[in-house]
Amino acid sequence: MLPLSLIFLSCFALVNAGSANRGENCTQSNSRLQTGTFQFFSDCNSVTYCAANGTCALKGCRKDDFPFGYTGNTRVPDKCGRGEFCPDEADACLPLLAVGSACQLNRDDQCEGPPNFVELRDTTNRGLNFNGSVCLNNKCMWANKTAGNTCTVENTAYIAYGPSGEFIDIVSRGDCVVGLYCDSASKQCMKEKALGAACTADKECSSWNCLSTGTCGTDTSVPRHVGTWVYVIVAIGIFGGIFGTLTGLFLLHRRQRDQEREKRMQYWREQNAFHQNLLQMRQTARASILSPGNGNSPRSTMYGRDGMHSDEAPILQHAAPKGSGLRHYMGDDSSEYDEGMMMQPSKRGDDNRF
Ligand SMILES: *[C@@H]1O[C@H](CO)[C@@H](O)[C@H](O)[C@H]1NC(C)=O
Ligand SMILES: *[C@@H]1O[C@H](CO)[C@@H](O)[C@H](O)[C@H]1NC(C)=O
Ligand SMILES: *[C@@H]1O[C@H](CO)[C@@H](O)[C@H](O)[C@H]1NC(C)=O
Ligand SMILES: *[C@@H]1O[C@H](CO)[C@@H](O)[C@H](O)[C@H]1NC(C)=O
């Protein structure tokens, strides 16, 4: 039962919502950010929020393009318009907050932008600020601190999970202008470091990637390009593999073909030799019948007739009948016996068994 309940609990953590349906009781004070993940949690399920009257009511807005938990016929609430934001609770759209107002963690979009938002806003897609404004330590401010200014820093320790288990991932945010970072120790805006410079955190590098060796590495979002020689080697590998296989198969099959041809050749020579032996036997028999004093023997009827091939010119008359490779191939276990049987005619030419 324990593993099941654990799975159930972890499902809860995944959907980031309670189980209470619309109209069911909830307690607003239970709404919180989850430990480690800092996801918003309430007693109500993912399509409702905990209203002030202690019941779950349908959400009134959304901040995501594709909000979680909506199925089939559930109506998805609209996103908020310009100058408004949808809070974590998602009860209703609220007007943007002025500098100094309380905002929710990582919700830079809840704060009103500065007049010079065009030059302050983050266009690097790193989430440094939203439209020039930033929410640090739950307070709206503008990301307008320049080099040497005292800045505000917010360090959030997330629980992250890697192959070697749980570890703490500290995300450090500040209100310096884009291109500078807020040094946690001195609370001063510093210039982002170039490739190869010594660093202690990702935020210090302009590439946003502080390697484990303590130097700034290349941007992990930059596509990796390989040299032309790699393409050449891959192409050679592919075509070499194809033609190598074809050539190898051709050579292998040619050898097999030659072996088969040689076997047939041997078989043919053997058969021809037997045929010649039979002709000789027949001629010997005929000669012995025709010679005086031998009279008519029953053999004369057997051997008297001219064979169909008696006049055929012997092609390989005295070719030594080697054991046929084909026969060897067909029955390896009785090859000696075969050999003996087939060799008999040549040894005992006038054996009348043949
Ligand atoms: C919900 O709250 C109301 C009022 O506090 C209470 O009467 C009711 O029993 C509660 N319902 C459940 C299912 O807890
Ligand atoms: C509780 O408040 C919500 C939102 O204002 C409203 O939709 C719902 O009808 C109220 N429920 C009760 C029981 O008053
Ligand atoms: C950015 O902030 C300015 C000034 O408050 C505002 O006029 C503008 O609409 C904002 N832009 C976006 C995309 O929110
Ligand atoms: C910088 O932003 C703060 C609010 O965070 C504002 O009070 C201050 O006037 C701004 N300074 C400049 C030079 O824009």
Image (spheres, rainbow, N blue to C red):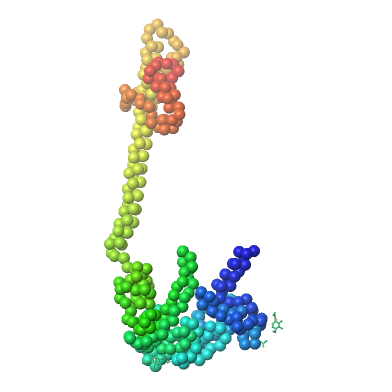
Give the quarter of the figure containing the C terminus: top left
Position of residue 247 measured from the top left corner of the image (x, y, whole percent): 32, 48
Position of residue 248 measured from the top left corner of the image (x, y, whole percent): 33, 46
Q: Residue furthest top?
A: 293
Q: Nearer the viewer, residue 327 or 36?
A: 36
Residue drawn at (54%, 79%) of the image: 33
Query: As drawn, is 31 to the left or to the right of 285?
Result: right
Position of residue 40 measured from the top left corner of the image (x, y, whole percent): 54, 79
Is 184 above or below relative to 305? Answer: below
Give the quarter of the figure containing the N terminus: bottom right
Residue drawn at (35%, 87%) of the image: 149
Q: Nearer the viewer, residue 139 or 93?
A: 139
Q: Quadrant of residue 333?
A: top left
Q: Nearer the viewer, residue 272 or 222?
A: 222
Is 305 above or below relative to 134? Answer: above
Q: Residue furthest left?
A: 229
Can see residue 325? yes
Query: As drawn, is 258 to the left or to the right of 31?
Result: left
Residue drawn at (45%, 14%) of the image: 299
Residue drawn at (33%, 82%) of the image: 190
Position of residue 204 measured from the top left corner of the image (x, y, whole percent): 35, 77
